[in-house]
Amino acid sequence: MKNIVAGREAVTVAEFAELALGTPVELWLGVEGETDEERAARLDAARDILADPEYRELPDDLIRLAARVVEDHPDLFNVVPLVRPARRRAARRGVAA
């Protein structure tokens, strides 16, 4: 099955997300090893994009995309409950008179 967005074929998941959102995914998620300066510049660019009227629907698009990922890949979000160890009760000692 082909994933075609805006007339372009997405080959990878990252390409699909970029075409669907109109921005690179790295803009929102960052990249490993980015400096504080790079992070600040990236977040500044992201704020500018969100302020642009052309992208006013972007938060809704992101939510729909995230919901689709969860629906298509539920195994990515398997949650395994951790068993808590039983609490030890302190032994009660009688009060000497």
Image (cartoon, grey):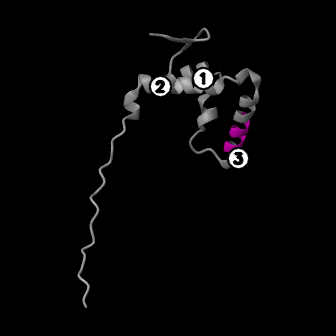
For label 2, the residue is 69
Rounded to the nearest whole Å, what is the CA distance between mark 2 and mark 3?
31 Å
Main SS, magenta region, reads helix
Q: What SS does tag 3 mark?
A: helix
For label 3, the residue is 37
The quarter of the picture where the C terminus appears is bottom left
Residue 43 among magenta residues: yes
Q: Which disc is residue 26 wearing?
A: none
**Relative to 24, residue 11 above or below:** above
Q: What SS does tag 2 mark?
A: helix
Rounded to the nearest whole Å, what is the CA distance between mark 1 and mark 3?
28 Å
The quarter of the picture where the N terminus appears is top left
**Relative to 35, residue 85 above or below:** below
Residue positioned 67% across, 22% down in the render: 57
Q: Within 10 angstroms of label 1, few (less than 14), some, or many (20 or more) residues?
A: some
Residue type highlighted by circle 1 = Asp
User: Total label count?
Assistant: 3
Pointer 1 or 3: first along the chain: 3
Q: What SS does tag 1 mark?
A: helix
Residue type highlighted by circle 2 = Val
Residue positioned 64% across, 33% down in the render: 27
Magenta range is: 39-45
Query: Which is nearer the eye, 86 or 61?
Result: 86
For label 1, the residue is 61
Query: Which is nearer the eye, 71 or 10?
Result: 71
Residue positioned 56% across, 42% down in the render: 32
- Asked whether residue 37 appears in the rendered view, the answer is yes
Left or right: residue 11 compared with residue 86: right
Residue positioned 62% across, 11% down in the render: 6
Pointer 1 or 2: first along the chain: 1
